[in-house]
C-alpha cells in the first residue's frame, strides 16, 4: 500500500464513522446524551476532513465517496436509531418506519449531491438541508427536549414524528441552505445577514451549552424556506412584468397597428 498525504483527511473521515458507530452503541444502552455528543464529534470531524484536504491539496474522488459513506452512518442511521430508541419505539412497526425517514432522506440527499457536485470548491449554498444539520436537529431535540419535562409527555410522540418528517423533507427538498460562512471580509460582504445570524447563533449555542441548537436549526430551516418562497414569487412576478412589456408595444413602435 502506498501511503500518501491524503491519508490524513481520510483518517479524519474514518473518525467521523467511528463516532457514528459509538453513537449507535450508546443509543442501545439508552445513553442519549452521550449518543448525541458522538454525533456532534462526528460533525466536527466531517468539517475538519474537508478543511485539511483543501489545506494540503489532497482532495480526491476517493475522499468524496468515503465521506458520503461515513456520513450515511453518522448522520443518517445513528440519529434515526437514536430517535427510535428514545421515543418512536412506542409505536412499534410504525415507529420503525417513521424513525427511518431521516436515514432514507439523508442517504438520498448524499447520492444527489454526489452526482451534482462539480469540483471540490466550497459552495455558497446547499441544495437541500445538509445531512449533518439534519442529524444535529434530531439529536438536539432528543437530548434537550424529547426526554425531559420541557415538552409534556402526551406531546412528545407527536413532536418526535414532526421533527422526523420536517428534517426529512428539508433534506430532500430543493430549498437553498446557506453554507457555513468563512471568517473573511469577502464572505461578510457577500452574505452579511447570514454571517451575523451564524455568529449570534454560535454564541447562543455555546452560552446555553448546546440547549439552543434545536431552536436555532429550526429557525435555519424556516428562514431558508421563507427565502425560497419569496424568490419563487419574485421570479414569477418579474417574468410576468417582462412578458407584459414584450406583448404591449410602445407608442413609438413603428410596427404598431393603425
Image: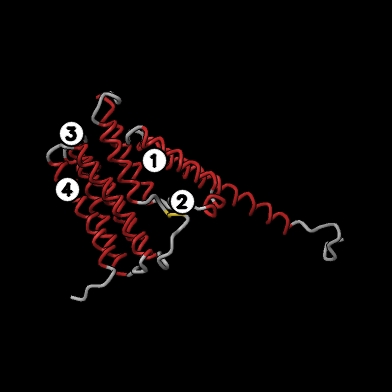
Mark sitting on residue 182: none
Pinpoint residue 99: horizontal percent, then vertical percent.
24, 43
Pinpoint residue 106: horizontal percent, then vertical percent.
31, 52
Residue bearing mark 4? 22
Q: Which of marks 3 and 4 precedes in the sequence?
A: 4
At x 30%, y 26%, the residue is 151
Task: Sort mark 2 into few (<14), some (14-19) or many (20+) by Cα contacts within 10 Å.
Answer: some
Distance in Å between CA atoms under marks 3 and 2: 40 Å
Q: Which of pointers 1 and 3 indicates the residue nearer the eye?
A: 1
Q: Is residue 33 left or right of residue 109?
A: left
Mark sitting on residue 90: 3
Distance in Å between CA atoms under marks 2 and 4: 29 Å
Q: Tell me where residue 230 sits by quadrant.
A: top right
Q: Nearer the viewer, residue 153 or 97?
A: 153
Distance in Å between CA atoms under marks 2 and 1: 15 Å
Q: Which of marks 2 and 3 precedes in the sequence?
A: 3
Distance in Å between CA atoms under marks 4 and 3: 24 Å
At x 18%, y 75%, the residue is 1
Pinpoint residue 48: horizontal percent, then vertical percent.
32, 56
Q: Tell me where residue 206 sits by quadrant.
A: top left
SS at circle 1: helix
User: How many numbered marks, from 0 up?
Assistant: 4
Q: Nearer the viewer, residue 25 or 54?
A: 54
SS at circle 3: helix
Residue bearing mark 1? 217
Amino acid at each position: 500500500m502506498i501511503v500518501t498525504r491524503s491519508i490524513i483527511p481520510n483518517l479524519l473521515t474514518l473518525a467521523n464513522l467511528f463516532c457514528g458507530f459509538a453513537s449507535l452503541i450508546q443509543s442501545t444502552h439508552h445513553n442519549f446524551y452521550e449518543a448525541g455528543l458522538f454525533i456532534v464529534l462526528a460533525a466536527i470531524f466531517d468539517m475538519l476532513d474537508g478543511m485539511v484536504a483543501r489545506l494540503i491539496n489532497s482532495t480526491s474522488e476517493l475522499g468524496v465517496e468515503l465521506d458520503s459513506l461515513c456520513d450515511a452512518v453518522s448522520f443518517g442511521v445513528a440519529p434515526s436509531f437514536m430517535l427510535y430508541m428514545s421515543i418512536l419505539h412506542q409505536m412499534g412497526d410504525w415507529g420503525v418506519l417513521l424513525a427511518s425517514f431521516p436515514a432514507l432522506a439523508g442517504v438520498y440527499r448524499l447520492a444527489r449531491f454526489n452526482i451534482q457536485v462539480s469540483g471540490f470548491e466550497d459552495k455558497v449554498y446547499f441544495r437541500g438541508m445538509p445531512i449533518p444539520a439534519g442529524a444535529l436537529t434530531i439529536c438536539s431535540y432528543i437530548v434537550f427536549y424529547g426526554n425531559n419535562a420541557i415538552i409534556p409527555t402526551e406531546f412528545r410522540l407527536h413532536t418526535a414524528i414532526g421533527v422526523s418528517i420536517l428534517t426529512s423533507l428539508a433534506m430532500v427538498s430543493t430549498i437553498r441552505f446557506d453554507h457555513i460562512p468563512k471568517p473573511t471580509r469577502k464572505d461578510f460582504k457577500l452574505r452579511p445577514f447570514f454571517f451575523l445570524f451564524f455568529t449570534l447563533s454560535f454564541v447562543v449555542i455555546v452560552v446555553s451549552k448546546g440547549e439552543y441548537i434545536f431552536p436555532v436549526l429550526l429557525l435555519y430551516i424556516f428562514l431558508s424556506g421563507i427565502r425560497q418562497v419569496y424568490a419563487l414569487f419574485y421570479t414569477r412576478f418579474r417574468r410576468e412584468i417582462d412578458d407584459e412589456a414584450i406583448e404591449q408595444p410602445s407608442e413609438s413602435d413603428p410596427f404598431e397597428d393603425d
